[in-house]
Image: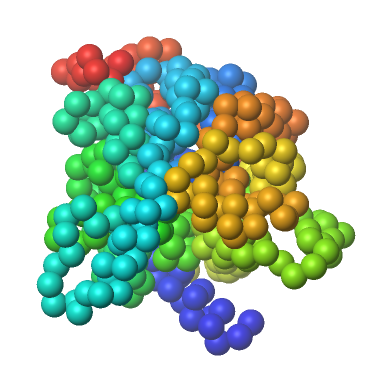
Amino acid sequence: MNWKGWAQMRRWWAHWKQRIGPQGDWALVLSGGGARSAYQAGVLHYIAEAFPDRAFTILTGVSAGAINAAQLANHTGTFPEAAVRLVQTWQAVRLEDVMEPESRWKVLRTLLRRARSNGEQPLPEDTLRGLVDNAPLRAFLKRHLQTTDGRLHGVAFNLKRGTLRAFAVTTTNYSTGQSVTWVEGRNIQNWERPDRRGVQTELTVEHILASAALPLVFPAIRLGDAWYGDGGISLLTPLAPAIHLGAHAILAISTRYKRSQAEGDAHDVAGYPPAAQILGLMLNAIFLDTLDQDAAMLARINRLVEKLPPHRREGLRPIRLLILRPSIDLGKLAANYRPPLKGALRFLTWGLGATETKTPDSLSMMLFDPDYIARLLEIGYQDAQRQHDRIAAFLEEAPRRPPGNGQPGSASPAISGAEAPPAAR
């Protein structure tokens, strides 16, 4: 292992020793992937059907995974009901629900304005901040999270009655480049590291929008006095938020297909790679590849902890991890569909050569096509079904939620005084 690897392991060890919370918390970690995150909903649909009484008390999400995590954390029903609702949300989504592409002329006008600007005068209010308008996505999230004021009332209710310990979404501070994880939970302490920090707050739709704000495509979101964008940009350790929050077991659902060596050696294009293929590789490196690296580091730390004698562990214990991923390449699957893009987004996508590659990863992230979404939901469900035994072995020790959706491990169906908000039922 080189010195960089040792430095990363030392950072891991530091936050491992300082992780908070009682033993017994199980976490669900949902990574990004744009439209491909519908796959996660399919996986969760099967898990909820097969293991309806299991409880994940810590939910973390980044990018589009933050949207999925928000749906689960905000739902006040049972795990199976929340999973079905998540699937229904993906079945209902259309491109116009997510974005309103700006015209190519508005984009050109913005570029000219910036070229002529000396940086001293503020640009006009109508200057574009992204290739698409995120107003449709904001309205869609408010509608499906059943909130009018942007607050996630179901999260507060679930925290109060004890079925949820923490819900966290990760964003990127565009001024500092720091990864900021926003947490709403019980008995949570802020944490600070050189490249990331955790902040206790009341989560809103704006935090979800910020985490899912794909750079350059979606405009950044102002939270407090800073601008934030997609959390996958600077998140090098996607498992760290769950560990900070006290998880001793983590189920992570990735949207990245793990290629075989033969598939990795195959060529997607015969000639020079188009810009869309290069862009797709960059997006994969930013949003998808870090989970595998973090899992490898977790495995090393687990081995170190297991080798320590019990009296020297200082309360540490190995953290169990199960990663579920697609059985087929979801980016390559996207080549069979043609998204109804328009405006500057269509001009840029086709201009970069998205149709020239067999694996249009950049295109798949924006492919909110009903047929593609339906196929992703189906693949996710079937993949989880095929791995039933593996999932069952992992969830064997998971806390169980009794009938009535009460607190895990409690005999009462609900905590006294916790009345479900009508908008979150």
Judge from the rendering whether residue 201 lies leftward or rightward of residue 71; answer left or right: left
Residue 38 in the image, given as x and y percentages of width and height:
55, 34
- Quadrant hosting residue 105: bottom left
From this view, report whether residue 375 is shown above or below residue 103: above
Q: Position of residue 238 (x, y in %)?
A: 47, 57
Q: How many marks?
A: 0
What is the quadrant of the C terminus in the image? top left
Q: Determine which quarter of the picture holds residue 266.
A: bottom right
Task: State left or right for residue 54 relative to residue 74.
Answer: right
**On screen, 199 above or below 157?**
below
User: If the image is split into quadrants, where does the N terminus sit?
Assistant: bottom right
Judging depth in this view, the residue of 106 and 5 nearest the camera is 106
Residue drawn where x is 43% and y is 73% of the image: 11
Please tell me which residue is depicted at 40% across the width and 31% down the height of the picture: 97
Residue 271 pos. (x, y %): 80, 68
| Residue 104 shows in this picture | yes
The picture quadrant where one finds residue 324 is top right
Q: Is residue 355 left or right of residue 183?
A: right
Q: Nearer the viewer, residue 147 or 44?
A: 147
Can residue 257 be seen from the camera position used here? no
Foreground residue among 293 and 224: 224
- In percent of width and height, residue 317 lies at 50, 56
